[in-house]
Image: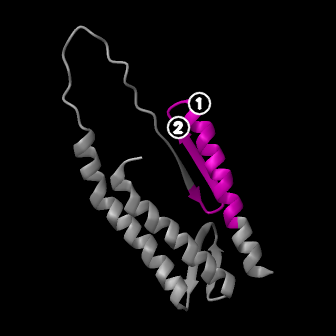
């Protein structure tokens, strides 16, 4: 893992912790409008969790160019063929429905596993909130 990614990742995890605690003590309401999830907070932990998420995205916005600058390599024009390939994948949630994509089968299977884990976390959080 790149050392620059520690700040956005830690802020994201803190946001999840604060929002989970706020949901547990009842100061956060979670719901769906058609397929779009929303969070309503009327307390300190909810505001802190949402702020951590926002700061995580903001820091990622400023850190990504730094990471790209450090990993950029000049192309080499020689007779040797390059064996470097990029692998990427992702999950997009539209409401409760995950859309999974990846550049190869291994990455796609990993993203399916990640989407299942995220869906389980969401369902457990909602069940804890309503029971």
Q: Report which quarter residue 21 is drawn in.
A: bottom right
Question: Which is more toward the observer, 75 or 11?
Answer: 11
Marker disc for residue 80 = none
Q: Which residues are magenta?
A: 93-122
Q: Give the x, y percent position of residue 116.
A: 68, 52
Q: Residue at x 66, y 61 (%)?
A: 96
Query: Can residue 29 be seen here?
Result: no
Secondary structure under tag 1 reads: helix
Q: Is residue 74 left or right of residue 42?
A: left
Query: Can residue 12 be seen here?
Result: yes
Q: Report which quarter residue 129 is drawn in.
A: bottom right
* Relative to 37, residue 74 above or below: above
Q: Is residue 104 magenta?
A: yes
* Relative to 78, residue 113 above or below: below
The quarter of the rendered structure image containing the C terminus is: bottom right
Q: Give the x, y percent position of residue 118.
A: 64, 58
Q: Which residue is mark 2?
A: 102
Q: Give the x, y percent position of residue 107.
A: 55, 36
Q: Residue at x 20, y 20 (%)?
A: 76
Question: Which is more toward the observer, 38 or 12?
Answer: 12
The residues bearing labels 1 and 2 have C-alpha atoms spaced at a distance of: 7 Å
**Label 2 near label 1: C-beta < 8 Å?**
yes
Q: Residue at x 18, y 16 (%)?
A: 77
Q: Which residue is mark 1?
A: 105
Chief secondary structure of the magenta span? helix
Q: Residue at x 44, y 74 (%)?
A: 52
Farthest residue, direction front: 3
* Relative to 109, residue 76 above or below: above
Question: Which is more toward the observer, 59 or 97?
Answer: 59
């Amino acid at each position: 893992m790149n050392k620059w990614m520690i700040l956005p990742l830690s802020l994201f995890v803190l946001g999840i912790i604060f929002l989970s605690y706020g949901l547990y003590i009842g100061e956060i309401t979670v719901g769906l409008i058609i397929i779009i999830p929303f969070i309503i907070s009327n307390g300190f932990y909810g505001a802190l969790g949402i702020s951590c998420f926002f700061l995580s995205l903001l820091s990622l916005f400023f850190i990504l160019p730094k990471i790209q600058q450090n990993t950029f390599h000049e192309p080499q024009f020689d007779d040797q063929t390059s064996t470097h390939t990029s692998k990427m994948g992702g999950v997009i949630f539209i409401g409760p429905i995950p859309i999974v994509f990846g550049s190869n089968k291994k990455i796609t299977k990993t993203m399916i596993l990640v989407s299942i884990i995220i869906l389980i976390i969401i369902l457990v959080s909602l069940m804890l909130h309503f029971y």
